Image (spheres, rainbow, N blue to C red):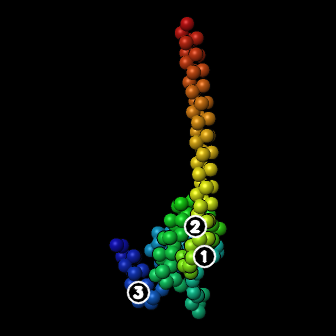
Amino acid sequence: MTSEARVCDAELSREGFARIGELASRAGVSVRSVRYYEEQGLLTSTRSPSGQRHYTEGEVERVAFIQRLYAAGLSSRTITELLPCVDSPSEENSDSALERMALERDRLSTHIADLVRTRDTLDGLMATARAHREQLGKAAVG
């Protein structure tokens, strides 16, 4: 653990909150990302009297969770729709989240199918180009 991380840990445990730079460092994201998550309504903070953002330990975990959702290819809007299941677990929120994830999975499957068709078309073009190149080589020799 770096000395900076130890300072962040000590600061968080002593005061019960972290400032934006500390949260970003602990979560492995940029300060800009943290600000964006707040703008999108994915993350909240409290403000000190001087206006500094303060985050709890739970926000560190939330940022990591948001990062995993982004890595899965979800948009901010979709993540916003899924967070009620995390923030207020209920049957209704779970059902809604499952429906939304199924839609995202279908969207990704369609995109994958489109990419496979594009790759297959490119493979065909490459085969045609190789055959043409081979014909040019034979014509030059013959």
Residue marked by disc 1? 92
Compared across the picture, whether 98 is left or right of 57 comes to right
Q: Quadrant of the N terminus?
A: bottom left
Instruction: Identify which amino acid the numbered label 3 is placed on.
Output: Ser
Image coordinates for residue 115, horizontal then vertical, percent: 60, 44
Q: Is residue 40 above or below residue 112?
A: below
Q: Which of the pair 30/39 is nearer the observer?
A: 39
Q: CA distance from mark 3 to mark 2?
A: 36 Å
Q: CA distance from mark 1 to mark 3?
A: 35 Å
Image coordinates for residue 125, horizontal then vertical, percent: 61, 30
Q: Secondary structure under badge 2?
A: helix
Q: Is residue 53 above or below residue 108?
A: below
**Residue that extends furthest to the left in the rendered view of this protein:** 1
Within 10 Å of disc 2 (Cα), the crowding (few <14, some 14-19, many 20+) is some
Residue marked by disc 3? 13
Q: Earlier in the sequence, mark 3 or mark 2?
A: 3
Q: Secondary structure under badge 3?
A: helix
Residues at marks 3 and 2 touching, judged by CB atoms closer than 8 Å:
no
Q: Quadrant of the C terminus?
A: top right
